[in-house]
Amino acid sequence: MKNDVENINQAALEELCKNETYHAQTLFRQNAKNNPSFKSFNNLGVFYAFEGLFKPDYSRRNATKLGIKYLKKAETLQKSYFTLFALGYIYFGFDEYKEAGTYFKQAFELKHSYASAYNLGLSFYRQFMYEYALNWFEKALNLCDDSNHIETYSAYLFVLLQIDKKKCREALNHLLADNVTPLIEYNKFILSYLCGDMVTAESLIRPMMGKFSLNLKEIAMVFDCLFKFNKRGEAEEYLKNKVEVLKEHDYRSRYDIKQFEKAFSQQEYRKNLISYFRYDMSIVKECCYYGCKQHNPI
């Protein structure tokens, strides 16, 4: 019986890897019907939530609510890391950050993973609960590897900025001096500017502008920083470049162009834009399928 359950599940995952989504769905359904367990319910729920519901002609419709139904069935049978993490990820996508955080915390209690700690910190950040967010990003830093250390440390600094600007500036200056964690120019500039270190921020503008396309709030910071150093001509150069790009890529760009011009010419509008800036952190996604040999071999 156990081998049969695992064989069907493995066949479903193999079909999914080949993008044979309808066949994978059929096998996941078969397993959940004939072999109801927290694992078979979990995998069917994950499929519905992240892949959708497919018809024989491969047409697809959203099935997130159906996915939640099966994940909660799995949860009633056994609380498992994959099920709790998947539910946290789904509720985060609905902007239900408190609910998401509850699931990520339960997932972390079962398995002290980087992803659950980071996502819990992000859930608190989205609720403006910065002390809690900082605590969980510190945990994530202790669990992360080299591939996600820079992103995690950036998140940590942006949360610290909300709590103690002076400590954030000290940490950033130490970081820049030692170059232990090489932040990207965008993060260096934004953090330096918001910490009030205009000299460092101004020095980073040209390297950053050559690599990143900034939105309205971000370029308002660039303008403001340059104006503080009486570099109106350089600010005007960036405005001109931005307008040219907007005209080239979007024929409906008249409104956007006016907003950028307003950010350039009106100090109060510029300050108002900057006051609403929030650093955009991306949630960490994990494979939540039991039996996935690539991601979850155990």
Image (cartoon, rainbow, N blue to C red):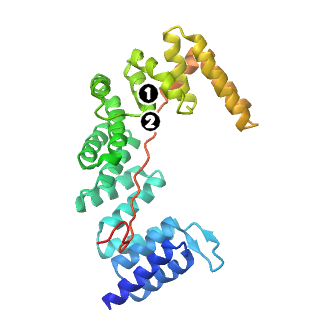
> Mark 1 touching mark 2, by CB under 8 A?
yes
Q: Is residue 30 above or below residue 59?
A: below
Q: Residues within 10 Å of mark 1 (few under 14, many from 20)?
A: many
Total labels drawn? 2
Label 2: element kind: loop
Q: Determine the residue positioned at 48% across, 83% down.
A: 27
Quadrant of the image containing the N terminus: bottom left
Residue 206 in picture, x, y percent from top left? 51, 22
> Between residues 265 and 153, which one lies in front from this camera angle?
153
> Between residues 12 and 79, which one lies in front from this camera angle?
12
Spot the residue most to the top: 230
Q: Is residue 195 above or below residue 124?
A: above
> Disc 2 marks which residue?
279
Give the left or right position of residue 282, taking residue 165 as reference. Answer: right
Q: Determine the residue positioned at 41% across, 81% down.
A: 9
Label 1: element kind: helix
Mark 1 and mark 2: span between their CA atoms? 9 Å
Residue 107 in picture, x, y percent from top left? 29, 60
Spot the residue most to the right: 251
Q: Is residue 253 visible?
A: no
> Disc 1 marks which residue?
190
Residue 258 in picture, x, y percent from top left? 69, 25
Q: Which mark is residue 26?
A: none
Residue 59 in picture, x, y percent from top left? 65, 72
> Between residues 67 and 21, which one lies in front from this camera angle?
21
